[in-house]
């Protein structure tokens, strides 16, 4: 055999060393891929948790807004009923001159206070953009 032909011959030790180096490199690439995949997976799970939190937040806002609207409608309805009953002379509070004005002012203050609370808590970002009610601190939960 010629010398150039002998240089192309791979020995068993060379083949074993080459396979070992490739396995080590393969394991390094596999660990790098696993590490990258875990980081992406954790990031995805964090994003999903944030999305679920926002979804729950807006669902609760919707439920609270319906509840508060119903509560305000009840308060306005009761006050209207009270005014009607007194105005139609079905109820007579002449012996209690202080009662009717007190109830009227109390309900009016409750309605205005509840409206301010609703606007400040449910529509915080919108109110901040417009600068409405800036002198009142926003409620925190």
Image (cartoon, helix red, strand yellow):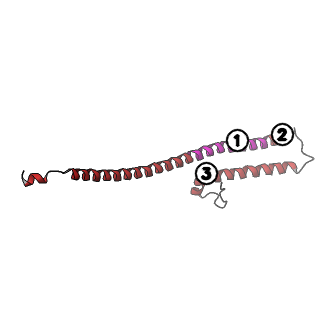
User: Does the magenta run of residues contain 61?
Assistant: yes
Tell me which label, 2 or 3, sits earlier in the chain: 2
User: Does the magenta run of residues contain 53?
Assistant: no
Q: CA distance from mark 2 to mark 3?
A: 36 Å
* Residue occupying image coordinates x 44% and y 50%: 38
- Secondary structure mostly seen in magenta is helix
Quarter of the figure with residue 124: bottom right
Per the image, label 2 sits on a secondary structure element best described as helix
Tell me which label, 2 or 1, sits earlier in the chain: 1
Q: Relative to 4, does residue 62 appear above or below in the rendering?
A: above
Of tags 2 and 3, the one toward the viewer is 3
- Residue 124 appears left or right of 109: left
Per the image, label 3 sits on a secondary structure element best described as loop
Q: CA distance from mark 2 to mark 1?
A: 22 Å
Asked whether the residues under the numbered discs 2 and 3 touch, taking CB atoms below 8 Å apart as contact, a structural biologist would say no
| Residue located beneath label 1 in the image | 70
- The magenta span reads 55-80
Q: CA distance from mark 3 to mark 1?
A: 18 Å
| Residue located beneath label 2 in the image | 85
* Residue occupying image coordinates x 13% and y 54%: 7
| Residue located beneath label 3 in the image | 123
Residue 81 numbered mark, or none: none
């Amino acid at each position: 055999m010629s010398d150039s032909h002998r240089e192309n011959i791979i020995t068993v030790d060379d083949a074993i060393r080459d396979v070992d180096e490739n396995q080590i490199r393969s394991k390094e690439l596999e660990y790098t891929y696993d590490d990258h995949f875990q980081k992406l997976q954790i990031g995805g799970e964090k994003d999903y948790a944030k999305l679920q939190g926002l979804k729950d937040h807006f669902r609760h806002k919707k439920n609270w807004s319906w509840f508060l609207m119903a509560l305000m409608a009840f308060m306005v309805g009761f006050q209207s009923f009270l005014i009607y009953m007194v105005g139609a002379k079905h109820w007579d509070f002449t012996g209690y001159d202080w009662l009717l004005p007190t109830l009227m002012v109390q309900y009016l203050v409750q309605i205005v206070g509840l409206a301010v609370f609703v606007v400040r808590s449910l529509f915080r970002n919108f109110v901040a953009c417009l600068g409405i009610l800036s002198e009142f601190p926003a409620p925190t939960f």
